Image (spheres, helix red, strand yellow):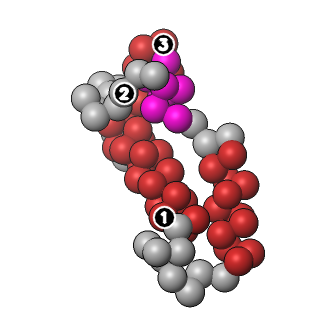
Amino acid sequence: MTLPAERSQALQNTREFLRSLLDPKKTPKVPKHIRKEAFWCLKHFPQDYDILIVAREVPEVFGEVDPGYKES
């Protein structure tokens, strides 16, 4: 069973993973089509602000938000 805090952490980790795929210095030898796909996945990926809003409105989905989340 996934806990709400684990769900928010998974989103944050996934976003950072996709961002790393876009950076050739962090992830060399990644094919161009993979970088392009990562870009399109990130285009509408939820940001910290979005997660904070959902956490406040529906705490059972994301629970207590990690203090590392920043409101922009």
Give percent across and percent down for residue 21. 54, 68
Residue type at mark 2 is: Lys
Q: Report whether 12 appears left or right of 66.
A: right
Q: CA distance from mark 3 to mark 1?
A: 30 Å
Question: Which numbered disc flags the more N-terminal residue, 3 or 1?
Answer: 1
Name the residue tied to disc 2: 70
Q: Earlier in the sequence, mark 2 or mark 3?
A: 3
Residue at image point 41% right, 21% down: 71
The residue positioned farthest toward the bottom in the image shown: 29
State the SS at label 1.
Answer: helix
Q: Is residue 68 magenta?
A: no
Amino acid under label 1? Ser
Image position of 19 with respect to 46: above or below: below
Q: Main secondary structure of the magenta part?
A: helix
Residue type highlighted by circle 3: Glu
How many residues crowd mark 2 within 10 Å: few (<14), some (14–19), many (20+)?
few
Q: Nearer the viewer, residue 72 or 12?
A: 72
**Mark 2: secondary structure:** loop
Of callouts 1 and 2, the N-terminal one: 1
Q: Which region is colored magenta? A: 47-53
Label of residue 57 in the image: 3
Residue 34: name its quadrant.
bottom right
